[in-house]
């Protein structure tokens, strides 16, 4: 019984992480200066999906931890992804330029 509870918590945390990553990625890809896509995603729709995914991530984390802890966990993961995404896009662009040239 204890093993299934920890597996459920792990699954819930994984889903929360995936939802938070999806939400932040939607926000990033709707930014006018994003570097992953030739054109940004439709701003209104992408930001709505991003907001709902972030809310879902927070709710999923709230299942396994205190809601305030879940909020700060969501914020920490969001800050990490918002830092990594532009650097990863720049590194990808540099690698593509190196292949072509």
Image (spheres, rainbow, N blue to C red):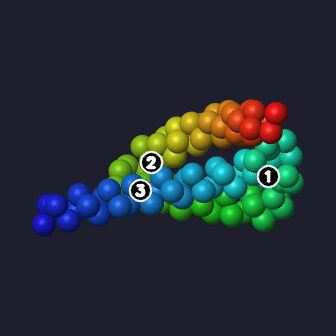
Residue at 78% in and 65% down: 45
- Residue at image x 86%, y 54%? 39
Vertical relation: 22 (above or below) 90: below
Residue 57, image x and y in percent?
51, 57
- In what quadrant of the picture does the C terminus appear? top right
- Residue at image location 52% in from the left, 38% down from the top: 76
> Can you identify the residue that label 3 sits on?
14
Upstream in the sequence, badge 3 or badge 2? 3
Decide: marks 1, 3 in contact (CB < 8 A)?
no
Above or below, 21 against 46 in this view is above
Res 13 quadrant in image: bottom left
**Sequence-earlier tag: 1 or 3:** 3
Q: Residues within 10 Å of mark 1 (few under 14, many from 20)?
A: few
- Report how far apart the C-alphas of labels 3 and 2 lie in the structure: 13 Å
Tell whether label 2 touches label 3 (CB within 8 Å). Answer: no
Work out whether mark 2 precedes mark 1 in sequence or the reverse, and give the earlier one: 1
Q: Is residue 18 above or below residue 96?
A: below
Residue 70 is marked as 2
Residue visible at 63% across and 63% down in the picture:
52
Residue 89, horizontal then vertical, whole percent:
71, 39
């Amino acid at each position: 019984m204890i093993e299934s509870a920890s597996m459920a918590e792990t699954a819930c945390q994984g889903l929360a992480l995936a939802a938070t990553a999806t939400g932040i990625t939607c926000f990033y890809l709707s930014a006018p200066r994003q570097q992953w896509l030739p054109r940004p995603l439709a701003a209104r729709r992408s930001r709505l999906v991003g907001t709902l995914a972030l809310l879902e991530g927070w709710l999923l984390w709230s299942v396994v931890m205190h809601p305030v802890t879940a909020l700060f966990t969501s914020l920490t993961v969001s800050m990490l992804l918002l830092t990594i995404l532009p650097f990863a896009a720049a590194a990808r662009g540099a690698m593509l330029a190196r292949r072509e040239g």
